[in-house]
Image (tube, coloured by chain):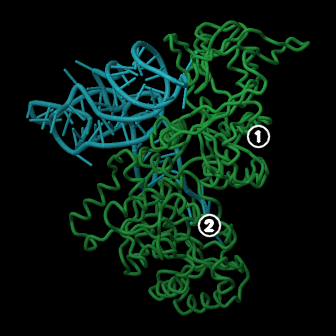
Amino acid sequence: MSEATQKSVAAPSNFIKTIVERDLAEGKHGGAVRTRFPPEPNGYLHIGHAKAICLDFGIAADYGGVCNLRFDDTNPLKEEQEYIDAIKQDVRWLGFDWQERELHAADYFEQLYEWAELLIGKGKAYVDDLSADEIREHRGTLTEPGRDSPHRGRSVAENLDLFRRMRAGEFPDGARVLRAKIDMAAGNLNMRDPVMYRILHATHPRSGDAWCIYPTYDFTHGQSDSIEQITHSLCTLEFEDHRPLYDWFIKELEIFPSRQYEFARLNLTHTLMSKRKLKQLVDSGLVDGWDDPRMPTLSGMRRRGYTPESIRDFCDRIGVAKANSTVDVAFLEHCLRQDLNRRAPRRMAVLNPLKVVIENLPEEHDEELDAINNPEDPDAGSRKVPFSRELWIEAEDFREEPPRKYFRLAPGREVRLRYGYFITCTEVVKDDDGNVVELRCSHDPETRGGQAPDGRKVRGTIHWVSARHAVDAEVRLYDHLFTDEQPGVGSVINPDSVEVLGGCKLEPALARAAPGEIVQFERRGYFCRDTKSGDRLVFNRAVGLRDTWARIQKQQQQG
RNA sequence: UGGGGCGUCGCCAAGUGGCCUAAGGCACCGGACUUUGGAUCCGGCAUUCGGAGGUUCGAAUCCUCCCGCCCCAGCCA
C-alpha cells in the first residue's frame, strides 16, 4: 500500500477530506476515523467500485483509521457465495487489507430484529397487510402526498404479535411487511412509511435458513454503520435522498451517530457501468464471462493486463466530487501506460508476419544479439535475441509505394532492425495475385547492434523475429466494448472489440512467459499472457502504445 | 404549485471574499531529442468561473432571481 501511495501523483484535496479534517479538528469521536466498503454480493466488482474502495480505504489510511469490508447482504434472492469470494479476491488484488474485519450485515440480523421490536414498542413501526401493489398506490406520487394504510393504527400489542409471527414463518412471502411510521405526506418518498422487513422464505448464503424475514437496505445500512461505529459512511449520490431516513433510524434507536456523505459515482466513456447490465452481458453470452478482458470488472481488467497500481493511481487522480461526470477512458489507459512503461519488460513480437530473407547471409547463419529489457529501467538488464538469415517483420512495416513521412521499409530503402543490423530492401517477391509475400534484403555487417561506423542515419527502426527461432502464438487485440461514447439501452457491442490473430511470431523468450505476465511488445503495446488458455500461448493486448504515425496518417487523409 | 442534488477550458478537477488577468491531470496542437514514429523534455491551450442583477474598496467564492442537467414513486442496493 505505502508503495503504491508513493508511486501515485499526490491526490488532490476533495470535499470528503475537508469534512474529515474538520471533524478531526473538532475532536469528533475522539479523533477516530472509521469507514467501510459495503458491496452487495450480487455481482462482480468493477472499476466504479474501485473508486469507492480507494476512497473508503484511502480516507481511513490517510487519517490513521480503519476500513471494514462489509457485505451488504440483506437480499438472499440476488446474493451468492461466488460473488462474496470474487469480491474479496478483487479487493485484495487491488491492494487493500481489511485484516480480520470481514463483516456481514447478515450477522446483525438478530440485533436488527430487536431494534425493529423496539420501534414497534415506541409506536414507530407497524405491520402492514397491504400487497406490494397496494402499498405503491398508497404511496402517492412525486407531486401528491400518500395515504395512510388502513393498518397504520394497529396497537403495539397487535403489531408485536404479528411481527413475531412473521418471523416464525406463519405467513407466505409478500403477505405482510413491517413499516416505519413516519409521514405519508413527506416530500421525500423515502420517508413515506418505508418498508423495514419483508417476508422471504429463501436460503441466505450466510445465514442459511435461520430467517424468513429480511430487513431492507434502509433498515440495515445505517444501523450496520452504527454497530461498527463508522464515523464517515461514504456512498454514491443516489442515496442522498435516503440520508434523512438513515438519520431517523439512528435517532429513534439512540445509537452511535454515523454520518453519511455522498459522492458522484464513476462513469467512463465507451463503458457500461451498472452491475445489472454487466450481468446481462454475461448471462446472454455476449461476453466471455465476468472476466472477459473487455469488461470493466476488476477481474476482466486483471485478465486484460491492468495493474492494481494503475487503477489506484487512476482513482486517486480522477478526484471525488458531487457533480455527475464521465471520465474519458483514455485517461484510464494513460494511467496504465504510465505504469507499464516503467516496469514492463520489452520483447519483440510480429503480429502480422511478412518474410524477409537477408541474401548476403549464409543459410546456416546463427548469432545472438543483445537486446535491452527496459530502457526505462537499467536494473532490468538485457537478453540475447537470436538472429538468422530469414526473419519475420510486421507486414505494415513495408510499403511498396511509401507515402510521405513513411520511414519504414520500401524498395531500395534502408532501415534498422531493432538491436540488429541496417537492412536494405533489394527485391519484392509477389504471388500470382500480386500480393507481397517476401522481401529480399541485404544487410550491412558493419552495423551490428544498430550503429553505422560511418555515422549514417536511418529514420526507421522496426522490430523483427528470427523465423527459425520464432514461437507461434495467438494474440487478441481488444478495443472498447462499445463504440458509443455513452452506451445506453440501444447500444450494440463494438464488432471490433476483439480481433484474434493467429500465427503471430514471437521471440523465443516469450515462450516462457507465465500466465498473467505483462510485457511490452516493442512498437505495438502492452500484452498480458492469458490466464485461461492453459498451455496455449495466448496474449491479450491491455493497451496499445501511443501511435504518432496513425495520427499523421489521419491528418494526411483529412488534409 | 413534491423532495434532494449539481453547474469552473473538449474531459476530469483544485479553488471556501483579496497572493485568481483561476492549480494540476487527460486530450489536443507545435517543437527538441530518440536504436520503440514509445518514453522524455520545452512551449501553447479559460482576462474567465451556467446567466442576469446586487452587496463589497475587492466575488468563481456572499445575496436575489432565472436557466440547464441529474436522482427519487422496489416488499433492490
Picture colour for chain A: green
Mark toward the start of the polypeptide (2 vs 1): 2
Camera-side residue of A36 and A348: A348
Is residue A479 visible to us here?
Answer: yes
**Tag 1 subunit:** A
Q: Nearer the viewer, residue A500 or A127?
A: A500
Which residue is denoted by mark 1 in the rendering? A474
Give the residue pinned by disc 2: A41
Query: What residue is rendered at 70% in x and 13% in y?
Result: A442
Residue A19 placement, left or right of B67: left
Residue A460 picture quarter: top right
**Up/down of A457 relative to A211, above or below:** above
Mark 1: which amino acid?
Glu
Q: Quadrant of the C terminus of chain A?
A: top right
Figure check: A129 above or below A161: above
Answer above or below: position of A444 versus A211. above
Q: Which residue occupies the foreground of this view, A55 or A436?
A: A436
Residue B29, percent from left and from top: 46, 16
Q: Residues within 10 Å of mark 2 (few under 14, many from 20)?
A: many
